[in-house]
Amino acid sequence: MLCLSSRKKEKKKKKEINLQKNESLFLEELIASSGGKYNPIRTFSSRQILQATDNFNMSNAICEDRFVWYKGTIENITVLIKNYNEESLTMIPDNIYRDIAVSSMMSSHKNVLKLLGCCLEFPTPVLVCEYPENGALTDMHAGEGIKPLAWNVRLKIAREIADAVTYLHTQFPRIIINRDLKLKNIFLDENWTAKLTSFSLSIPIPEGESCVIDIICGTTPHVEPEYTATGFVTENVNVYSLGSMTLSLLIGKSWFIYHPYEDYSYKRLTDYVEECLGQGMFTKLIDPSMLNSVDDNVPDHSRVQMEAFVELALRCLGLRPGEDKPRMIDVAKELKHIEKQT
């Protein structure tokens, strides 16, 4: 009995130490990110989190990256619980607090996964978010592919994510650059509305400045080459990533694509796109699930939209010589215009 009591006391003490450390670091980040203006964030107990995830049982996981997303239930409400894995903690330990802070600041936007609260009783915080009924755009079993979705849904997803990132760029005292825009960080609610998530790699640009220097981070094929070469973080970092994400939505694969004629089985997405366009094989770019199974064709109005969609993506990627990359607000406007084309 004494041994059991001692273990309980030790466990309680560890929770208290974790709580004190995390509360301090989180509050510091929240004040820095929001300029001191923020809404209170609800905290959950470690017991609630462990019960909801069955002790972080992978059978409850729906998506995995540098972290694992678990489906769970707290107080009879279905939620999504985000737990960072050990490898990511060695790479970006402090950025978890930024993820919570920026997620909280962005939660009012309809195209951002709403943060319900967090648990600070573990060695590193755990996030609790709303549950999107249609899950992850790329789930545990999708590999490099995405769910089979209609063209109008994919176009809407691109526009909605551009809207969310525009908000991130324009609605706070300092421009915030996400640096982690990719299909894996998008969820879909019951109405197939896109929900952007994951802001751990976000970084603010100082007021009055157009860039900030920082270490290179993000998903490698998706990082702007200029940022990789110089370490300068500008708005173009997000514009480039959105362009790559846009192409992935059309093709149905994330970042790399199978190419049977190469010694290596994968080719960069941008190389594949330029090769297809150069050979006049636009249809080859389109996810086969969107093609007419009889003649491998698409309706004329959809093709007009798709061609404009690809051209915009290539401008975002800086692959149209003589044309400047568009600003994110202009990308969002242009995607809205493409949606209206018939």
Image: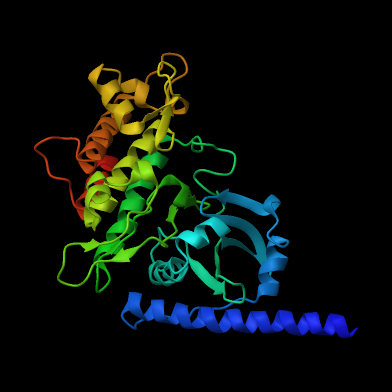
Q: Nearer the viewer, residue 269 or 148?
A: 269
The residue at the point 49 percent across, 51 percent down is: 187
Q: Is residue 193 above or below residue 22?
A: above
- State whether residue 245 appears in this view: no
Residue 40 placement, left or right of 231: right
Out of 199 and 304, give the one closest to the viewer.
Answer: 199
Specify the quadrant of the image occupied by residue 109: bottom left
> Outermost residue, left direction?
322
User: How does the figure colour the protein chain or chains?
Assistant: rainbow
Marks counted in the figure total: 0
Q: Is residue 36 visible from the viewing direction of this image?
A: yes
Q: Nearer the viewer, residue 26 or 189?
A: 26
**Measured along the vertical axis of the image, is residue 225 above or below residue 180?**
above
Residue 142, given in percent of the width and then of the height, sits at: 55, 37
| Residue 75 placement (x, y as % from top left) | 68, 71
Is residue 98 rendered to the left or right of residue 66? Answer: left
* Screen quadrant of the C terminus: top left
Provide residue 203's location: percent of width, then percent of height.
32, 64
Location of residue 112 by image quarter? bottom left
Q: Residue furthest right?
A: 1
**Relative to 152, 321 lies left or right:** left
Query: Residue at coordinates 88% horizontally, 85% vertically from top-left?
Result: 2
In which quadrant will I find the N terminus? bottom right
Q: Along the horizontal axis of the image, is 36 left or right of 26? A: left
- Residue 267 position, x and y percent, is 38, 28
Q: In the picture shown, does residue 271 fall above or below 108? A: above
Look at 45% across and 71% down and name the residue there.
97
